[in-house]
């Protein structure tokens, strides 16, 4: 990130946690779909 911790607003940590959670959930969904598609064959 270009911003340092000093310049980050108060909602910085919360936004980072939400973003990380969203990335993890989306990755799990993609992996589940790929796994199910491979099992069907």
Image (tube, helix red, strand yellow):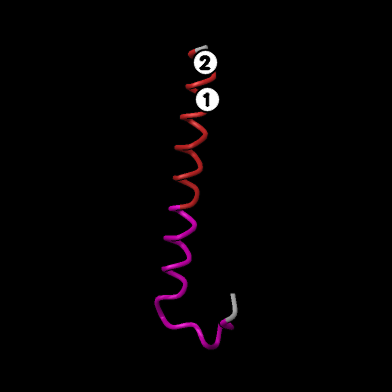
Location of residue 13 with respect to 35 vertically, above or below:
below
**Could you tell me which quadrant the N terminus lies in?**
bottom right
**Could you say which disc has been placed on residue 12 in the image?**
none
Above or below residue 34? Residue 22 is below
Mark 1, residue position: 35
> What is the x, y in percent for residue 12?
45, 75
Residue under the image location 45 percent in, 45 percent down: 26
User: Could you say whether the residue bearing mark 2 is in a helix, strand or loop?
Assistant: helix
Q: Position of residue 38 (x, y in %)?
A: 54, 19
10 Å crowding of disc 2: few (<14), some (14-19), many (20+): few
Q: Is 7 rendered above or below residue 31? A: below
> Measuring 52% from the left and 15% from the top, which residue is drawn there?
39
**Residue sitting nearer the eye, 40 or 9:** 40
Marks 2 and 1 sit apart, C-alpha to C-alpha, by 6 Å
Residue 30 in picture, x, y percent from top left: 48, 37
Look at the picture and state if 37 lies above or below 11.
above
Quarter assignment of residue 9 = bottom left
Most foreground residue, 1 or 37: 37
Q: Which residues fall within the magenta stretch? A: 3-22
Crowd rating for badge 1 (residues with CA inside 10 Å; few <14, some 14–19, many 20+): few
Front in this rendered view, residue 41 or 2: 41
Q: Are marks 2 and 1 in contact (CB under 8 Å)?
A: yes
Q: Looking at the image, which residue is at 52% across and 12% down? A: 41
Residue 5 is one of the magenta-drawn residues: yes
Label 1: element kind: helix
Q: Across the whole image, how many numbered discs are drawn on residues?
A: 2
Residue at the location (46% across, 29% down)?
A: 33
Outermost residue toward the top? 41
Q: Position of residue 22 (x, y in %)?
A: 43, 53
Question: Which of the labelled discs sits on residue 39, or is there none?
Answer: 2
Toward the front, the furthest residue is 41
């Amino acid at each position: 990130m270009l911003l340092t911790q000093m310049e980050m607003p108060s909602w910085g940590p919360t936004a980072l946690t939400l973003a990380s959670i969203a990335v993890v959930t989306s990755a799990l969904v993609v992996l589940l779909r790929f796994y199910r598609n491979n099992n069907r064959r």
